[in-house]
Image (cartoon, helix red, strand yellow):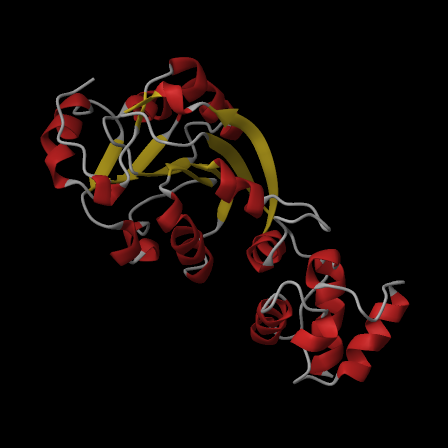
Amino acid sequence: MITHNFKKKFGQNFLQDKNIIKKIVDICNPDKEDLIIEIGPGAGALTEELVKKSKVLAYEIDIDLKNHLLEKFSNNDIIFIFDDFLNRKISEDLTDYSYKNIYVIANLPYYITTPIINKIIEENINVKKMVLMVQKEVGDRFSAKVGTREYSSITVFLNYFFDVKKEFVVSRNVFYPKPNVDSIILSFTKKEKSNKVLNEELFFKIVKDSFKQKRKTLKNNLKDYDFFKVEEVLLKNNLPIDVRAENINIDTYIEISNKLNS
């Protein structure tokens, strides 16, 4: 482990277990024609395995790691950008690359996970798969099943774009410094959307409003919409009128949105 002044503001916890690192890389299984975007390489433990497989574009916000990373990977096919990933125009950073597929791999602090996923979606980066290590509680929300307490608007939002899968839990004991919680590896595989939403802005607004007050029924949360149309969709899908948002799957939300758009 390098000597480093760990910065709490960056949520720095460096992964040390080589077996876990190899498992993370194997989930993507990239080849030499692919490009991997790594967000937050830290000391470069995961990066060491990535450069064996593919070209790497790595974003590191902590400038104090610059000398270490540039020296360590001076002979590898990798470019480091020492900047905040959220402040970059990623599509412009990619213009100098040719690649077959893009993969994103990152170990993310919980407070920045959703903004990073949103950025990738909003910039329309054609990512084949993302493999993200996140706080276990966050991972449970992202991959929650319909009808569970963890199921929320972010679950529906992410499942609109990706097939989200829990891969495996990572103990807090394999990091330095040791965090207070366990982590989980999630894979996000780009979804070819078969049920096309007619109006994505309306769809996302309806989903957000549906979970506005989670213990209230859908009828209460969507009182500003034409609920007769919503009711029609609910009945078609054998759902009660007093159903709550967490008991509605993404396909039904798409139906509701398209119905209200007509």
Left or right: 229, with 116 as reference point: right
Q: Residue at x 75, y 57 (%)?
A: 247
Residue farthest to the front, as pictured: 215
Q: Is residue 77 above or below residue 103?
A: above
From the viewer's perspective, is 69 left or right of 114?
left
Q: Is residue 212 shown above or below 92?
A: below
Query: Which residue is located at x 67 percent, y 68 percent?
Result: 197
Question: Residue at 35% across / 56% down in the picture?
Answer: 91
Question: Residue, x 54% and y 37% (percent of image)?
Answer: 187
* x and y, in percent, of residue 183 in the image: 45, 31
| Nearer to the camera, 67 or 172 | 172
Quick one: quadrant of the N terminus? top left
Q: Quadrant of the C terminus?
A: bottom right
Image label count: 0
Residue 48, x across and y down, in percent: 30, 21
Pick whichever, 219 or 85, lies toward us. 219
Q: Residue 51 placed where, x, y %? A: 33, 25
Say which of 252 and 49 sits in front: 252
The answer to whether 192 appears left or right of 78 in the picture is right
Q: Quadrant of residue 46?
A: top left
Res 92 quadrant in image = bottom left
Q: Is residue 102 visible?
A: yes
Q: In which quadrant of the rendered view does residue 69 lie?
A: top left
> Seen in the image, is 11 located left or right of residue 219?
left
Question: Percent from the top left, x then y, of residue 65?
Answer: 15, 33
**Residue 21, placed above or below residue 77:** above
Q: Is residue 129 visible?
A: no
